[in-house]
Amino acid sequence: MKKLVFCFIILIFLLCTTLYAQMRGGMMGGAQQFAPQQYVPTQDKWFMEQLYLVRGGQLYDDWWRTTVDTAKPDSDQSLWKKQTSNKRKGYDTYRCKECHGWDYRGKDGAYGKGSHYTGFIGVLQAGKNLSIKELEESLKGSTNKDHDFSGNISEDDMFDLALFMRKGLIDTREFVDNAGIPLGGNIRTGDYLFQRNCTHMCHGRWGTAINFGDDEKPEFVGTIAHDNPWEFIHKVRNGQPGTRMPSAILNEWSQRDILNLLSFARTLPKESPKFDWGRGWGRRGMMGMHQRDYAPGRGRGFGPSLE
């Protein structure tokens, strides 16, 4: 009899736990798990297209870190001499984001002023108006011979990049205003998303387990969310090139999920805390591996680091 009662109590407990989890998932907007995934071959046409699209997003960010067989240029890109306001040199002048911006609007967006200003147009309209084939040809210099990247990246790279521009670009003005302030977003739900998906394996409770910058000028999750929300949105959607960071696109996150996460991330510290358990723990285990991914010269290739 006692065993029967005990089993009944356990059954009720499990039932209540399941119901609570379902209710909480509903209250939190049906948030999905954002854990690192193995990018394995599949026959699912939709998934494979999204996979190539996300890789294109990482190529747009930093094509040298996304590939494994490309040479890193040390001279300026041919178009760079047509502008004088942006003083960056070498490989930075080859990154798509440096000319066209994290918001894909070029001179009409966030890079319309400041040290990143070049005067070059964005790619948002081109992505809407041109076909994938036309976008590929533009990467080969069809519209401007100085915009020929065929000597730097492969045909497959160009296809992935064109696919991202055709089907993966978004108008970030639906997320943030011109000053970068989120247009809505639930901080409490964003907190839940961050704790569930971003803390234990990667960034720590306060988003400071990984320093994207250096000791003199540190950058953390909160720093990026404050200072460059357009970059935050791009990297959440596509992942960080050459690291284990997964993609919100592949995990089917909604615009609301990303906006909630951004709103919460802006509450996180922008500078190094005096003491942070998360950062100390980040020297070991999975967070330690992430930390090493960001070391200079490390972490090349799409998905998990190949070094």
Image (spheres, rainbow, N blue to C red):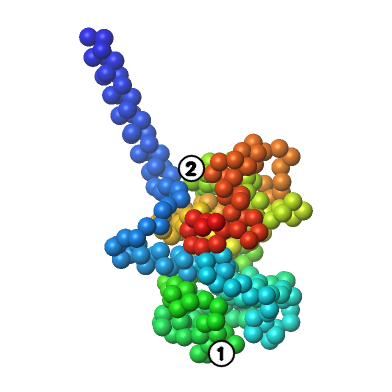
Kindly tell me whether residue 29 is visible in this rendering: no
Q: Position of residue 242 (x, y in %)?
A: 54, 60
**Residue with the mark numbered 1:** 144
Q: Quadrant of the C terminus?
A: bottom right
User: Badges 1 and 2: C-beta atoms under 8 Å apart?
Assistant: no
Assess disc 2: are there few (<14), some (14-19) or many (≥20) residues with their C-alpha within 10 Å of its C-alpha. Answer: some
Kindly tell me whether residue 82 is visible in this rendering: yes
Point out the tag, 1 or 2, that comes first from the N-terminus. Answer: 1
Quadrant in the picture for residue 107: bottom right
Residue at x 72% of width, y 73% of height:
88
Give the side of residue 281 with respect to residue 123, left or right.
Answer: right
**Residue with the mark numbered 2:** 196
- Counting every numbered tag in the picture gives 2
Assess disc 1: are there few (<14), some (14-19) or many (≥20) residues with their C-alpha within 10 Å of its C-alpha. Answer: few
**Which residue type does callout 1 highlight?**
Asn
As measured in the structure, the alpha-carbon distance from the residue carrying label 1 to the one carrying label 2 is 46 Å
Q: Position of residue 41 (x, y in %)?
A: 34, 60
